[in-house]
Structure formats: structure tokens, C-alpha cells
Image: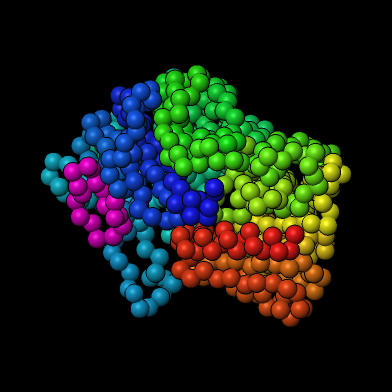
Amino acid sequence: MLTAELIADSRVPSNPALSADGRWVAYQVDTIAKGVPEIWLAAVDGREEPRKLAEGSSPRWSADSLYFLRDGLIHTVDGPLFAWRSEITAFLPMRDRIVFVAEDEAPAADIWVWSESFRPARLRSFDRRTGEITTLVEEHVVDIARRQDDKVLAVVTWPNPELDSGGLEPRLTLLDLETGDRRELGTTAVETASPVWWRDDDGWHVAYLATPEIVGGLAVFDVPVETGEHRNLTPESACPIGLAQVDSGAPLVLVADGLDTALHRLGSGEVAFWRGQADALASNGEIVVTVLSTTYRPKDVHCGPMGEALTRVSDTAPEFAGLPWGSQERLSYKASDGLALDGLLVLPPGKTRADGPFSLVTVVHSGPYDRYADRFMLGWYPSAQWLALAGHAVFLPNPRGGQGHGHEFAASVAERVGLEEWSDLETGIDLLIAEGVADPERLGIAGGSHGGYMTAWAVGQTSRFKAALMVAGICDWGMLAATGELGPLVEAAHVGSIGWEGTGPHRHDQLSPISFASKIETPVLIVHGADDTNVPLSQAEFFHRALRHFGVEHDFVVYPGEGHSIRGRAHQLDLLRRTREWFARLL
């Protein structure tokens, strides 16, 4: 029988790294409830049982050894390589050195001064022969990539360590490790990450992922080192989500493709297609490693030759084998304006559509630039299988604004969140009612982060829902611009204003659920982490006070010490049980 404990204690693989000889893959394993991560090793051909090597995270190979992070320091299986007085956040092992990113020193514990509290994480080098540590880049470094010959680094920097402002002005720098010379390749697009090197007849290139517009999703940019020109090489129809450097030739690109995932080679198109969701990638150009989840199988590490079928080489959640799951069905339908949409429907175990109508819980994904792929739907958050096993049908829609359908689909919510998105959700719900799947008198809605926003928005637009669950959700965009870590410009891109444009009326007020609080009749379970910096607790407090003022039934739950994601085991168990009880009582 599936229990809340089984979910919280289950394990998930991530961060695969392929050995230099292509024979082994190292990967990180975490429990869903935050615990000590582990490093595991598996044979690429799947002929040997995977085994645990050590406690740690972020495995990285050199030509002859495996390195990883543990307690903020770089380790091998024999122990730490050197001491450092602040946490190391990124590193690359090279032939004669290890380059790493770390702050200077621990901050003062008893005072916060804005100009002093954001300390840059600088790029440093540890010399394997002498043990000497030197600073290579003084600016705040967020990502690094080594050229295949180990002679030059590509370095992504911010002008300051704050997400608001610094993260909006990333720069790309080349650092020659032999001479110490730097070459600036200029400002990049927002959210630059995952730089990779590659080479063709025209010389060396650096490619990277970034957001061309704040709303609209990621793209792959390419910079020929010779010219320094930043070129967006992403087709309008593609949604890249990952980028991998290979030993030779153009890099590989992981692409969200509807409910599935494709693998492209930059500039050449698709080279593989996988049903379900792949969300991590490593390759040498001949062997591909990814973390893949399909309809009834949780995430596992898969490997295989380029363009051939993959072999599953890990089994990180064997406890789920043999348990009954709700049937998961792919949906395809049209929005009210004719736009093609997709999503998923999960029915209670052993049930078919003919057994309906069912109580229906619509679970809205986060983002908005996210999606539901056809993967295993189970977790600590409001997850489909957990609700389906309690007897509900669960609708997992992919409204516009998300991944998997190209740039125009994703960018269509710019300055318009909650509008066409809500229409897309309601169209899908109405379709399931018309088909006899959903009981119109027993409808619920749930979501976290942007899904929490859409939940709060929905109950202010209609009284058709009998229960709602809002996890880390937004109720006031102006307050979020003032207090959230992403800052005013990012939030304004979603809603069109932030409050400092004058006395109003403001666009963001028209798109804030708090403006419609007087119309809410639906009972709402509000859940939030006390230390959330992405969507601060003040959002939940404001919504709670509004519902209390208007006499709306609601529960307000705050988990101490939690951020935007609820990671504590006891808190996850409470949320899983509380969610079931809430919808059981009201639906």
C-alpha cells in the first residue's frame, strides 16, 4: 500500500556524469525529503549492479578519477582534497588543477547590511602539484565550462550577486589558463547558464542557454569566438531545457516536445526522441546518459549509444514496483480560440472513464514556463497519483505559457498571466465534464508557486470549485515585486506593472487574486514555507487576512524553516495527509 512515508523516503537520481572512457556513469541520489545525498556508480552497458560510492553531490570526472562535493568541499573517495572556509558551489577537475567557485568568507551573523551582505562567489584554482590556491576571476561567477583541451575557460559572471539586477545582466568571459589573458564576449541574455565549448571549421564556439525575453522560455545562443557575435540558434518551435558539451562536434540539446522529450544536435535537428520526461543530460558524443521518467516508472538513469534505444541502469525506487497506480491518459484538445493544447488525466486505480463521473482535482503546474510531461506523477506536492489513490480523477493541464510548444506559445502570457491561462484550464475542465469524467458538483483545484497563483486566481473568478489548495502561491504582484528575490523587472514582465509607475490604476492589480478576494466562496487550504524568498510568506498572510475578513472557510498552514520547496520530512508527511483530508472532506 502506498503511504505518505513511502513517498517522503523515496529516492531520486540527478546530475549524471559520464567517465572519460565512456564505461561508467556516476550520479547523485537524494531522498525526496531532504537528507544526505549519495554518489552512485553504474556501468553504462547495465551489466553490473549499481553501487553506492560515498555520501556527496555533483559528481565530476577527470581523466583518471571521480570528484564530488561533500559538506561544501571537493572530495574523492579518499577524502577532501583541501580545506576552504566557505561552501564551494561549483567545480571542474582538470589535468593539473581544479577550478572552483566559492565566496571569500562567512558573513556576519548578527547584522544585515545590503551593500555588504551580497558577497561575490569568485573563481579560484587549486594547483594539484603545489597545493596553492589562487583567485582567477574577482567578479561574481555563476557558471563555468572548460574547453576540451583544458587551456581556456568560459565564465559566466554577474555584476553583483543579487538575482534582481545582477541576474539580469550576465556577461560571458574567456579566460586563458596558460597566459591569464581575458577576453570579454559581452553581455548575454537573461538567466544565462550551461556554457559549453565546441569546434567546427570556423574555429571554437561557446554555446549557452538563456532567456531572450524574460517571459517566453529558454533558447540556445552560440558565440563564434572569432567574431564574438551572440546568435540565437533556436527554432521558434523548439523549447530547449538542457545543453551538454561533447568531446567533438556540436553540443547536444535536450528539448521539451509536447508531453515527451527530444534530443537535438545544435544546428542539425533531432537525433533521438523519448516518451516521457528527461531532465538531465551527459554525453561524450557517442554515449548518451539521461535521467528519464515514464508514465508508471519514476526517474532513473538511462544510457545508450547515440540514436539507439536507452538501457535503464539504475533502480532508485524499487519500493514502488507492484503497487497499483491510477491509469494515466494523454489529452489533446482545443482552447476556446482554437489553440492546440495537451495535458494528462489520471483516474483512480482500477477505474475507467465508464466508471465516472468522478470528483476531479485540477492540478496546475508551476512556472509559468514549466509543463506536465507523460511521466510518473508522484511526489510530496499535490501529486496526481496520491490524489487518484484517494478516489479522485486528476486533470493535469498544459495551458499556454509553458514548455513544449515553442516560443510563441510560451511568450503569449507576457503581461497577461491568469487570462488566457484560466480560459485554457476551464476549457479542459468543461470537456471532462461533457465527456462524463468529472462531476461538476465535485471540482477541486490545486497548485504550487505559479500553480498556487492560478489556484488563487481561479477561486476569485468562479465559485464552481468546492475546494482549493494554494501552495507557495502569489496573491499580490505588487508586493511580490517589492519582496520577492526575482525583483521588479521579472515580475513586471508577467503582469505589465509593479506599482512605481504612478498612482494607477495598475495592470498588476487587475491580475492579482487579492483584488478579487471579495468574490471568493471556495474553501482554500493555504500552505507556505516560513523562509520562502521566491514567493515570501507575506503573500500567504495577505490572502489569509482577506479570506478571514470576508468570512471564507480556509486553513492557513506555515512550515517553519522551509523555503519555496517543502523539504523537511515531517512537513512533507503533514502536507500529503492534509491534502488528502482536505479534498476528501470537501469533495
Start-end of magenta stretch:
69-87
Identify the image quadrant of residue 545.
bottom right
Residue 366 or 388: which is nearer the viewer?
A: 388
Please report the residue visible at 65 percent of the width from the left and 52 percent of the height from the top.
390
Quick check: is 72 in the magenta stretch?
A: yes
**Can residue 493 be seen here?**
no
What residue is rendered at 30% in x and 55% in y? 72
| Quarter residue 144 falls in | top left
Q: Residue furthest left?
A: 130
Residue at 51%, 60% (x, y): give it. Answer: 573
Q: Is residue 171 above or below residue 264?
A: below
Q: Is residue 546 left or right of residue 193?
A: right
- In this view, the residue in front, 281 or 90, is 281
**Visible in this render: residue 67?**
yes
Count of numbered labels shown in the rendering:
0
Vertical placement of residue 152 versus 565, above or below: above
Q: Residue at x 50, y 46 (%)?
A: 192
Closest to the observer: 580 or 159? Answer: 580
Task: Classify residue 291 as left or right of residue 139.
Answer: right
x, y percent for residue 176: 30, 38
Please check the rendered image and state whether residue 339 is part of the magenta-colored stretch, yes or no. no
Residue 71 in percent (x, y) is at 29, 55
Q: Which part of the image, by quadrant, shows the C terminus? A: bottom right
